[in-house]
Every structure is written in structure tokens, then in C-alpha cells.
């Protein structure tokens, strides 16, 4: 089974792994909320938004093919658009509904050889209210 986002095989060109982000409650020290640095304790303000991090390498046979892979990912994380949630599926069939790709960054330079490749990190979040 291949991983996908909104039915698109964005990361299947190379090895990649899914990692769960922090989970639990969003807690803030009362000293921050009330402005009194001597105030002890914390208060919670709801659940943390679910995050899934995907790390791996985009791999292609040519420079232009690698750019096509990069463009396919960045189109989903385009900052000029409101994120459109979709279903994120890992290579083992585990799926998360209502996820948005909100950050993509490349890890290092493009490797050139028999194939062209670049490392990346992508972050998906289930925004509260979407």
C-alpha cells in the first residue's frame, strides 16, 4: 500500500516515514495568562491540534522530474490559499481525516547522480474548526 494525501502519491518516489506530533492538552502557566510572575500552576485551554510529520526523500530520474515532484507537494502547501483538508494515509493503511499540509521544507542540497533526489520534511495538521 502506498502513502497518499487527498489520493495523491506525493511521497512515494522515495523512502519516507510518518511520525506523530505532540498529543494531549494545551496547557499554559497561569503566570503567563495573568501576567503575575509569582502565580503558581497552569491552566489547560483544550486539546492540541493533531500533527503528523513526514520525512523522506523525493527521488526522480531527471532534474525536471524532481521539480515536478517538488511542485506537486508545494501546491498542496501553497500559502496563498486557505488549506484544504484531506485524508492523509501512511504506507501501512493508517489514515487521518481532515489534515492540512501546512509546511514543507527541503533538507539540504539536491543530490545528482544516477537519480536526482532531495530530502524533505512535511508537516500536516488537523486545524481545530475545519
Image (tube, rainbow, N blue to C red):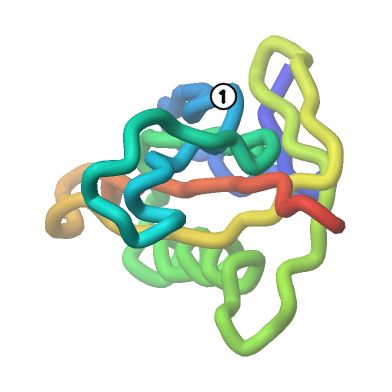
User: Is residue 95 shown to the viewer in this render?
Assistant: yes
Q: Is residue 111 above or below residue 80?
A: above
Image spot of residue 84 (x, y percent): 80, 65
Q: Quadrant of the C terminus?
A: bottom right
Q: Residue at x 70, y 54 (%)?
A: 100
Closest to the observer: 71 or 65?
71
Residue at 79% across, 24% down: 95
Identify which residue, 98 or 6, lies in the foreground.
98
Q: Residue at 30% of width from left, 55% of height from top?
A: 36
Give the side of residue 120 with respect to residue 80, left or right: left
**What residue does disc 1 label?**
23
Q: Position of residue 118 (x, y in %)?
A: 27, 50
- 79 relative to 44, above or below: below
- Most extreme residue toward the top is 92
Q: Is residue 71 above or below residue 92?
A: below
Work out whether residue 63 or residue 109 is closer to the camera in this orientation and state it: 109
Task: Count neighbours of disc 1 (C-alpha within 10 A) and say few if under 14, some if 14 to 19, many if 20 or more.
Answer: few
Query: Which element is circle 1 on?
Result: loop
Amino acid at each position: 500500500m502506498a502513502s497518499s494525501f487527498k489520493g495523491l502519491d506525493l511521497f512515494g518516489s522515495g523512502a519516507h516515514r510518518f511520525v506523530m506530533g505532540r498529543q494531549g492538552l494545551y496547557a499554559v502557566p497561569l503566570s503567563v495568562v495573568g501576567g503575575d510572575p509569582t502565580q503558581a500552576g497552569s491552566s489547560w485551554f483544550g486539546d492540541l491540534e493533531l500533527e503528523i510529520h513526514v520525512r523522506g526523500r523525493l527521488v526522480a530520474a531527471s532534474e525536471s522530474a524532481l521539480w515536478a515532484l517538488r511542485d506537486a507537494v508545494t501546491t498542496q502547501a501553497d500559502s496563498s490559499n486557505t488549506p484544504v483538508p484531506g485524508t492523509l494515509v501512511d504506507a501501512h493503511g493508517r489514515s487521518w481525516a481532515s489534515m492540512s499540509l501546512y509546511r514543507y521544507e527541503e533538507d539540504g542540497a539536491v543530490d545528482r547522480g544516477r537519480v536526482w533526489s532531495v530530502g524533505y520534511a512535511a508537516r500536516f495538521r488537523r486545524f481545530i474548526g475545519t
